[in-house]
Amino acid sequence: MTSFADLGLAESILRALREEGYSTPTPIQAQSIPVLLQGRDLLGIAQTGTGKTAAFALPILHLMAQTRRPLAPKQARALVLAPTRELAVQIGDSFKAYGRGQGVSVAVVVGGVSMGPQIKALARGVDVLVATPGRLIDHLDNGHVRLEGAQFVVLDEADHMLDLGFIVPIRKIMAKLPKKRHSLFFSATMPREIATLASEFLHDPAQVSVTPVATTAERVEQQAMMVDAGAKGAILIELLRNEAWARTIVFTRTKRGADRVSKALAQAGVPAAAIHGNKSQNQRQAALDGFKAGRTRVLVATDIAARGIDVSNVTHVVNFELPDVPESYVHRIGRTARAGAEGAAVSLVDNDERHLLRAIEKLTRQEIPRIERRANPPAVENDRAPPGRPAQRQQRGRGGQPQRAGQNQGQRQGQRPPQQREGQGGGARAEGRGPGGPGAAAQAAKRRRFRPRPQGEGARAST
Ligand code: AMP
């Protein structure tokens, strides 16, 4: 297997990687680093969790070290564009960590915080500038930074940029870049608009593609709990009473939903914080820091806020509501099982969400084992979207009549027991970590774990 030394990276970088505990390059790193060191542009099809940040940061740092020159005021030698503030901060941290032996200067320029310190950092010039598009444009328009000296430009999570409506700002930024530059472009998916943008942005790129969307899903032990809509809050609290759920991200569809769930959890004595687009940048960072440090066991997040978040050792992901877009499910559950680790994901699926579950199973080409928790499960499951509503965009009222958490129906007839899933999804797992484990004892333990509390205990109504 290739080592980082085989890739020809500078000794100071190899030392930093040893300190980070990286022993072997991930596939995206093994494939991208050699072509980037040759100076070629790169089109990388990869999602977060594959090690793509190091795949672009390491060769950029290596090449920068070879051509060190004094920094020009208000100029950046490398520009990295990222869709979210959290991702930008993480990328900045990665450059600092991998470049610590060569004294690189890194500035992170994101919205939601004051401009002053950013202006000051840019004034001297920086080696690496990591930015979200909107704030970078503010600085460009005000003459705080210029891009004509940029040697390296990375566009990260391009498809997410498209989702967030950043394509116009990106084109505006591209117009200010020098024609002669080393360009890198990463995206998890390649819709037509993104492929067009890539072809404008890159010159004769090498193309590297890793981890098709379904593969991440295979490493995560998944379960769908069929529940009554009104019982979700109580079931979530019940799940989180299990201490094996040490670091859990709960996904909701809306910002208000995230606030409601985190409040209900806090009331039930589960330390939780919400992270979404209506929170200030400082609140978002504080929530993330508390979660990373283990002070907050549960982070309640919306898709936008959570994409790109890199927290190690996330034990569980809960989909409090399934996303409308099946790809988001894969991104969500990819918050656990990062960098080859294992993880578990539980989705609370009410009757109106069954068609979304089917769409996810179609995308990942996996059947997600069901656990029945509805008070009155239908005799015949109807997974189709309700008539008159497009499947992907269905508006679901979450509430309906609050209902009690159902009697435990146990695993439904015909459901594959966990041991049959071994080998398909990454083999045996530590007991208490996944929703289920191998063997009869684990199954019994699982039934205990998922048994509803006696009625009256715990929160009942929807959150
Ligand atoms: P990324 O896809 O860049 O968000 O990286 C996902 C996670 O993998 C981060 O926590 C990195 O620190 C970690 N990572 C990246 N490369 C390696 C490697 N070669 N060995 C071990 N961990 C890595």
Image (tube, grey):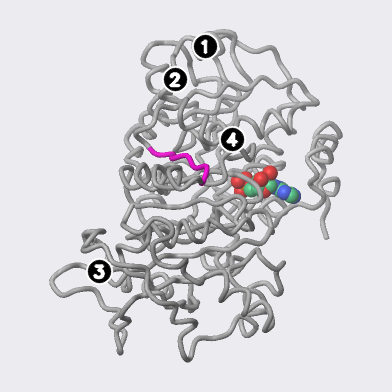
Examine the rendered structure and indicate whether residue 434 appears above or below residue 262: below
Where are the magenta residues, as a range?
270-276
Residue 443, horizontal then vertical, whole percent? 62, 79
Residue at the outermost left position: 388
Query: Quick one: label 3 or label 2, which is nearer the N terminus?
Result: 2
Distance between mark 2 and mark 4 Cα atoms? 16 Å
Query: What amino acid is found at the position of numbered circle 1 in the picture?
Result: Pro
Which of 279/400 is in front?
400
Q: Are marks 1 and 2 in contact (CB under 8 Å)?
A: yes
Query: Quick one: label 1 or label 4, which is nearer the N terminus?
Result: 4
Residue 379, horizontal then vertical, whole percent? 30, 89
Query: What amino acid is found at the position of numbered circle 4 in the picture?
Result: Gln
Which residue is under mark 4? Answer: 90
Examine the rendered structure and indicate whether residue 72 appears above or below residue 268: above
Q: Is residue 107 visible?
A: yes
Distance between mark 1 and mark 2 Cα atoms? 9 Å
Examine the rendered structure and indicate whether residue 337 appears above or below residue 285: below
Circle 3 Cα neighbour tier, 10 Å, few/some/many (<14 / 14–19 / ≥20):
some
Distance between mark 3 and mark 1 Cα atoms? 47 Å
What is the secondary structure assignment of the residue under circle 1? Answer: helix
Q: Is residue 314 left or right of residue 355?
A: right
Which of 260/287 is in front?
260
Distance between mark 1 and mark 4 Cα atoms? 18 Å
